[in-house]
Image (cartoon, rainbow, N blue to C red):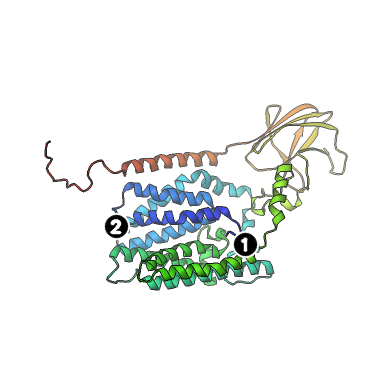
Amino acid sequence: MTYIRSDFAEQLACALFPLMLLAALRLCDFLDDSPPKLSSIALFALPFAGVWLSNAPAGVIASYSMALFFVCAACSARSWQPLLRGVAGLALGLGLAAFYLLPAAYEQRWVNIRQALSSGLLPSQNFLFTAINDPEHTWFNWIASYCALGLLLLLALTALGSRRFSATADSSLRSRRSFLALLVVGASATLLTLPLSSPLWNHLPKLRFVQFPWRWMSVIALVASCFLAVVAEKRLGWLWVALLVLLTVPLASFLVDNTWWDEDEMSAQRDAIDSGHGFDGTDEYDPLGDDHLDLPPNAVLALALPTEQEDSPAPQVGLQIERWTTEQKDIQVDALAPARIALRLLNYPAWRVEVNGKAVAAERRDDVNQMVIPVEAGSSRIRVRFARTWDRFWGAAVSAAAGLLAALLLWLGRKRPGNPHASENEPIVPS
């Protein structure tokens, strides 16, 4: 993650996984500190929403992992309560992240989202130790596979060493149930890294958009860490930790030596942004009917196009860019004849175009989905705004309602003042 992909959003999501799991354990009454309260639902929903807001594939992984965890908890406890509280926590977390999730789900129909599953990005091409007709991709996949293999070995050894999921004298019923649920989640994550899980990848909703089965290493590492913590508490447990630290040294050396970052990449990209030239985007976020590889390179912000055939001369037009920000474009046009103004802008449905205060429908070029705006002869003022569509409005409304509900649950679950160890039937002695 650090030396090969440098995916900081995914790293942030993984950093929230332990907090999410801790809240899930409390929600299922697997901790000995206190029974779950209404506030436990909100305390789980907050890190769960944080994972979704950090990285969408990690959000899918967290959703399936936690759903399976709650099912296992309900089965082991033979009670619907852990499952009902878990479903409430998942729903509240999705509600908190709705201001992102609802637009992300709805606006997929605006873009070539299927390109996210193009060749090289399919789960079937990224199972552990899978080779395809791309040496660089295969080498990367084998690096990830060796890392996953090391984690799987750690999970197996620490699970056997802890024996926390088995009925032993030093394990309580809550402990056995919680670690049995963790073992099931870890085993399921392991299964999803192997080719025999292909039917699950093909049929479970949105699981394909995780793309890389080795991304489930985030869950395997989390479960392995829990078992490692148990083993470390045993006699000579420090040897496990010491051995793990020693093994990370050659692994880190291997990853650093085999990374292929170009030192000039980031500086070149920063210069492209600062200069306004921009950089190539990814295929899946292109609007429908467009291929970003066909876009004209070094295009100007606004350009007059021929009104008839593409090879005819363009009319003489005076163009002045008054404002050009991410969501606002203002252009002054002075034309002696009707003209078509092409903006360095792609036609997404949320753009709203006005010419001299009147709404107009943007056109497109024949070969790419570049925004083209027709203007009449004379002076025209083009205003382009990125509007707040209904999905963004309702997503924000759902998140606001979920935020209020989470605050209410936290308020209702707060501790009452006074001595928590005092008996309710203890008489009050006046002073």
Read off the residue under disc 2.
32
Callout 2: SS? loop
Q: Could you say which is closer to the camera, residue 9 or residue 240?
A: 240
Read off the residue under disc 1.
121
Q: Alpha-carbon distance for marks 2 and 1?
A: 44 Å
Q: Is residue 311 left or right of residue 363?
A: right
Q: Is residue 95 left or right of residue 390?
A: left
Q: Residues within 10 Å of mark 2 (few under 14, many from 20)?
A: few
Q: Amino acid at mark 1?
A: Leu
Q: Could you say which is closer to the camera, residue 321 or residue 230?
A: 230
Q: Residue 84 placed where, x, y %?
A: 35, 54
Q: Could you say which is closer to the camera, residue 138 or residue 251?
A: 251
State yes or no: discs 2 and 1 in contact (Cβ < 8 Å). Answer: no
The C terminus - image quarter = top left
Compared to residue 269, the image places residue 123 above or below, namely below
- The earlier-in-sequence mark between 2 and 1 is 2
Compared to residue 8, the image places residue 99 above or below, namely above
